[in-house]
Amino acid sequence: MKVGIILTTDNRSKAYIQKLIKNNIILDEIILMNSGNHEVKYSKEIIQKSLESGFDISISVLTTLKENNLKFHEFNFVDINNLKLIEYVKKSKINYYLFTGGGILKKDILTAGSKFIHFHPGIVPDYRGSTCFYYSIINENNCGVTSFVMDQELDTGDIIYQKKFVKPNHKYIDEIFDPFIRSETMIEVIQKDLIKKSKFLKQNKSDGETYFIIHPVLKHISIMNCIK
Protein backbone atom coordinates (compact mmCIF):
# COMPACT_ATOMS: atom_id res chain seq x y z
CA MET A 1 0.00 0.00 0.00
CA LYS A 2 1.33 3.42 -0.98
CA VAL A 3 0.65 6.64 0.91
CA GLY A 4 1.37 10.17 -0.35
CA ILE A 5 0.61 13.70 0.78
CA ILE A 6 -0.75 16.76 -1.00
CA LEU A 7 0.66 19.91 0.60
CA THR A 8 -0.22 23.56 0.23
CA THR A 9 1.83 26.50 1.52
CA ASP A 10 -0.15 27.08 4.72
CA ASN A 11 0.79 26.57 8.37
CA ARG A 12 -0.90 23.19 8.50
CA SER A 13 1.32 21.87 5.74
CA LYS A 14 4.38 23.36 7.45
CA ALA A 15 3.58 21.34 10.56
CA TYR A 16 2.82 18.17 8.58
CA ILE A 17 6.00 18.08 6.52
CA GLN A 18 8.31 19.19 9.33
CA LYS A 19 6.98 16.52 11.68
CA LEU A 20 7.18 13.82 9.03
CA ILE A 21 10.86 14.68 8.62
CA LYS A 22 11.52 14.83 12.37
CA ASN A 23 9.98 11.40 12.80
CA ASN A 24 11.94 9.94 9.87
CA ILE A 25 8.73 9.09 8.02
CA ILE A 26 9.16 8.76 4.26
CA LEU A 27 5.97 8.82 2.19
CA ASP A 28 5.69 7.39 -1.29
CA GLU A 29 4.89 10.72 -2.94
CA ILE A 30 4.79 14.42 -2.13
CA ILE A 31 2.69 16.89 -4.12
CA LEU A 32 2.91 20.63 -3.47
CA MET A 33 0.17 23.01 -4.58
CA ASN A 34 1.89 26.40 -4.62
CA SER A 35 0.28 29.57 -5.96
CA GLY A 36 3.44 31.59 -5.23
CA ASN A 37 1.96 33.83 -2.55
CA HIS A 38 4.43 35.70 -0.34
CA GLU A 39 5.15 34.22 3.08
CA VAL A 40 3.64 35.95 6.11
CA LYS A 41 6.14 37.52 8.51
CA TYR A 42 5.56 36.33 12.07
CA SER A 43 6.50 37.83 15.43
CA LYS A 44 9.08 36.24 17.71
CA GLU A 45 6.28 35.30 20.10
CA ILE A 46 4.28 33.28 17.60
CA ILE A 47 7.43 31.64 16.21
CA GLN A 48 8.36 30.56 19.72
CA LYS A 49 4.88 29.13 20.28
CA SER A 50 5.18 27.16 17.05
CA LEU A 51 8.56 25.77 18.13
CA GLU A 52 7.00 24.67 21.40
CA SER A 53 4.41 22.83 19.29
CA GLY A 54 7.04 20.98 17.28
CA PHE A 55 7.31 23.03 14.09
CA ASP A 56 8.70 26.34 12.87
CA ILE A 57 5.98 28.54 11.41
CA SER A 58 8.59 30.87 9.87
CA ILE A 59 9.97 28.22 7.48
CA SER A 60 8.07 27.77 4.22
CA VAL A 61 6.98 24.37 2.95
CA LEU A 62 9.05 24.84 -0.20
CA THR A 63 12.16 25.65 1.82
CA THR A 64 11.65 22.58 3.99
CA LEU A 65 11.28 20.33 0.97
CA LYS A 66 14.36 21.71 -0.77
CA GLU A 67 16.62 21.83 2.28
CA ASN A 68 15.85 18.19 3.03
CA ASN A 69 16.34 17.11 -0.60
CA LEU A 70 12.84 15.68 -0.81
CA LYS A 71 11.48 14.79 -4.22
CA PHE A 72 8.12 16.43 -4.93
CA HIS A 73 5.80 17.33 -7.79
CA GLU A 74 4.74 20.98 -7.82
CA PHE A 75 1.60 22.60 -9.23
CA ASN A 76 1.26 26.39 -9.56
CA PHE A 77 -2.21 26.56 -7.99
CA VAL A 78 -3.96 25.78 -4.72
CA ASP A 79 -7.13 23.99 -5.77
CA ILE A 80 -7.69 20.36 -4.88
CA ASN A 81 -10.30 20.09 -7.67
CA ASN A 82 -8.08 21.46 -10.45
CA LEU A 83 -8.27 19.32 -13.60
CA LYS A 84 -4.47 19.06 -13.85
CA LEU A 85 -4.27 17.58 -10.37
CA ILE A 86 -7.16 15.23 -11.07
CA GLU A 87 -5.45 13.91 -14.20
CA TYR A 88 -2.21 13.47 -12.25
CA VAL A 89 -3.95 11.52 -9.48
CA LYS A 90 -5.63 9.27 -12.05
CA LYS A 91 -2.20 8.19 -13.30
CA SER A 92 -0.61 7.79 -9.87
CA LYS A 93 -0.20 4.50 -8.04
CA ILE A 94 -0.90 6.01 -4.62
CA ASN A 95 -3.60 4.29 -2.60
CA TYR A 96 -4.10 7.09 -0.07
CA TYR A 97 -3.19 10.78 -0.10
CA LEU A 98 -3.03 12.74 3.14
CA PHE A 99 -5.14 15.84 2.53
CA THR A 100 -3.92 19.14 3.99
CA GLY A 101 -6.21 21.67 2.28
CA GLY A 102 -7.10 23.34 -0.98
CA GLY A 103 -10.88 23.29 -0.91
CA ILE A 104 -13.74 20.83 -0.49
CA LEU A 105 -13.15 17.67 -2.50
CA LYS A 106 -15.69 17.21 -5.28
CA LYS A 107 -16.78 14.06 -7.08
CA ASP A 108 -14.13 14.19 -9.84
CA ILE A 109 -11.15 14.16 -7.46
CA LEU A 110 -12.82 11.70 -5.07
CA THR A 111 -13.33 9.23 -7.92
CA ALA A 112 -9.91 9.74 -9.54
CA GLY A 113 -8.59 6.46 -8.12
CA SER A 114 -6.78 7.35 -4.90
CA LYS A 115 -8.53 7.81 -1.56
CA PHE A 116 -8.00 10.86 0.64
CA ILE A 117 -7.42 11.01 4.38
CA HIS A 118 -8.40 14.09 6.36
CA PHE A 119 -7.40 15.13 9.88
CA HIS A 120 -10.46 17.04 11.00
CA PRO A 121 -10.24 19.26 14.13
CA GLY A 122 -13.27 17.79 15.83
CA ILE A 123 -14.49 14.48 17.25
CA VAL A 124 -17.11 13.30 14.77
CA PRO A 125 -20.02 12.84 14.61
CA ASP A 126 -20.45 15.36 17.44
CA TYR A 127 -18.32 18.04 15.76
CA ARG A 128 -18.64 18.10 11.99
CA GLY A 129 -18.13 21.21 9.88
CA SER A 130 -16.03 24.34 10.32
CA THR A 131 -13.92 25.79 13.19
CA CYS A 132 -14.99 22.92 15.43
CA PHE A 133 -12.11 23.37 17.86
CA TYR A 134 -13.59 26.69 19.01
CA TYR A 135 -16.97 25.12 19.71
CA SER A 136 -15.32 22.20 21.48
CA ILE A 137 -13.34 24.54 23.75
CA ILE A 138 -16.56 26.36 24.69
CA ASN A 139 -18.63 23.21 25.17
CA GLU A 140 -16.12 20.75 26.62
CA ASN A 141 -12.97 22.70 27.52
CA ASN A 142 -10.87 20.53 25.17
CA CYS A 143 -10.35 19.76 21.48
CA GLY A 144 -10.20 16.66 19.35
CA VAL A 145 -9.09 15.41 15.94
CA THR A 146 -10.65 12.71 13.81
CA SER A 147 -8.78 11.03 10.99
CA PHE A 148 -11.13 9.66 8.36
CA VAL A 149 -11.36 8.60 4.73
CA MET A 150 -13.08 11.40 2.86
CA ASP A 151 -16.35 10.93 0.97
CA GLN A 152 -18.74 13.25 -0.86
CA GLU A 153 -20.51 14.42 2.29
CA LEU A 154 -19.11 16.71 4.98
CA ASP A 155 -16.98 14.89 7.59
CA THR A 156 -18.94 11.63 7.33
CA GLY A 157 -16.23 9.27 6.08
CA ASP A 158 -15.00 6.05 7.71
CA ILE A 159 -13.10 6.82 10.92
CA ILE A 160 -9.46 5.75 11.20
CA TYR A 161 -8.49 7.29 14.54
CA GLN A 162 -9.59 9.90 17.06
CA LYS A 163 -7.54 11.80 19.65
CA LYS A 164 -8.38 14.44 22.25
CA PHE A 165 -6.12 17.33 23.30
CA VAL A 166 -6.01 19.72 26.23
CA LYS A 167 -7.01 23.23 25.16
CA PRO A 168 -4.09 25.58 24.39
CA ASN A 169 -2.73 28.13 26.87
CA HIS A 170 -2.26 30.80 24.21
CA LYS A 171 -4.32 32.79 21.69
CA TYR A 172 -2.84 31.41 18.47
CA ILE A 173 -5.49 28.78 17.91
CA ASP A 174 -5.76 29.09 14.13
CA GLU A 175 -2.06 29.68 13.46
CA ILE A 176 -0.47 27.21 15.91
CA PHE A 177 -2.90 24.99 17.81
CA ASP A 178 -4.89 23.81 14.79
CA PRO A 179 -1.76 22.68 12.85
CA PHE A 180 -0.35 21.20 16.06
CA ILE A 181 -3.26 18.89 16.89
CA ARG A 182 -3.75 17.79 13.29
CA SER A 183 -0.07 17.03 12.71
CA GLU A 184 0.29 15.17 16.01
CA THR A 185 -2.67 12.97 15.09
CA MET A 186 -1.23 12.37 11.62
CA ILE A 187 2.05 11.13 13.09
CA GLU A 188 0.24 8.72 15.42
CA VAL A 189 -1.87 7.33 12.56
CA ILE A 190 1.24 6.64 10.50
CA GLN A 191 3.39 5.29 13.33
CA LYS A 192 0.61 2.93 14.43
CA ASP A 193 0.22 1.79 10.81
CA LEU A 194 -3.52 2.42 11.03
CA ILE A 195 -3.99 3.20 7.32
CA LYS A 196 -2.51 -0.10 6.20
CA LYS A 197 -4.51 -2.03 8.80
CA SER A 198 -7.68 -0.63 7.20
CA LYS A 199 -9.82 -1.31 10.28
CA PHE A 200 -12.00 1.74 9.76
CA LEU A 201 -15.22 2.54 11.63
CA LYS A 202 -18.26 3.50 9.58
CA GLN A 203 -20.17 6.56 10.75
CA ASN A 204 -23.90 6.81 11.09
CA LYS A 205 -24.37 9.87 8.91
CA SER A 206 -27.60 10.85 10.65
CA ASP A 207 -25.87 11.20 14.02
CA GLY A 208 -24.08 14.25 15.38
CA GLU A 209 -24.11 17.94 14.61
CA THR A 210 -22.62 20.15 11.88
CA TYR A 211 -21.11 23.51 12.82
CA PHE A 212 -20.50 26.56 10.65
CA ILE A 213 -17.80 29.26 10.80
CA ILE A 214 -17.91 30.57 14.33
CA HIS A 215 -19.25 34.04 15.10
CA PRO A 216 -16.49 36.51 16.14
CA VAL A 217 -18.02 36.95 19.60
CA LEU A 218 -18.06 33.21 20.26
CA LYS A 219 -14.53 32.95 18.87
CA HIS A 220 -13.40 35.61 21.33
CA ILE A 221 -15.07 33.75 24.22
CA SER A 222 -13.25 30.56 23.18
CA ILE A 223 -9.87 32.32 23.00
CA MET A 224 -10.40 34.00 26.37
CA ASN A 225 -11.21 30.58 27.80
CA CYS A 226 -7.70 29.52 26.77
CA ILE A 227 -5.66 32.46 28.02
CA LYS A 228 -7.47 33.58 31.18
Image (cartoon, rainbow, N blue to C red):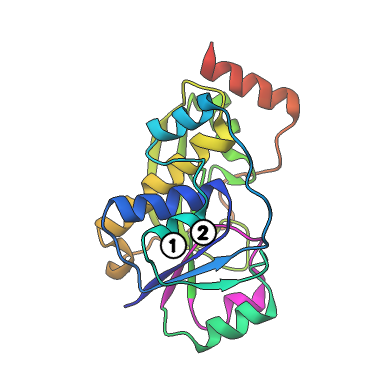
Q: Residues within 10 Å of mark 1 (few under 14, many from 20)?
A: few
Question: Percent x, y for residue 66?
Answer: 44, 62
Q: Which residues are magenta?
A: 95-114
- Which residue is under mark 1? 66
- Which residue is under mark 2? 62
Residue occupying image coordinates x 60% and y 16%: 224
Q: Which residue in the rendered view is the most extreme toward the front? A: 67
Residue occupying image coordinates x 65% and y 76%: 107
Residue type at mark 2 is Leu
Residue type at mark 1 is Lys
Question: Percent x, y for residue 95?
Answer: 41, 78
Instruction: Name the one closer to the observer, 81 or 135.
Output: 81
Quote the CA–CA distance across marks 2 and 1: 6 Å
Question: Percent x, y for residue 205?
Answer: 56, 58
Q: Is residue 175 above or below residue 198?
A: above
Q: Residues within 10 Å of mark 2 (few under 14, many from 20)?
A: some
Is 127 on the left-hand or right-hand side of 67? right
Question: Percent x, y for residue 113?
Answer: 51, 83
Does residue 81 appear anywhere in the picture? yes
Residue 102: in magenta span: yes
Contact (CB < 8 A) between labels 2 and 1? Answer: yes
Question: For residue 86, what is the image quadrant?
Answer: bottom right
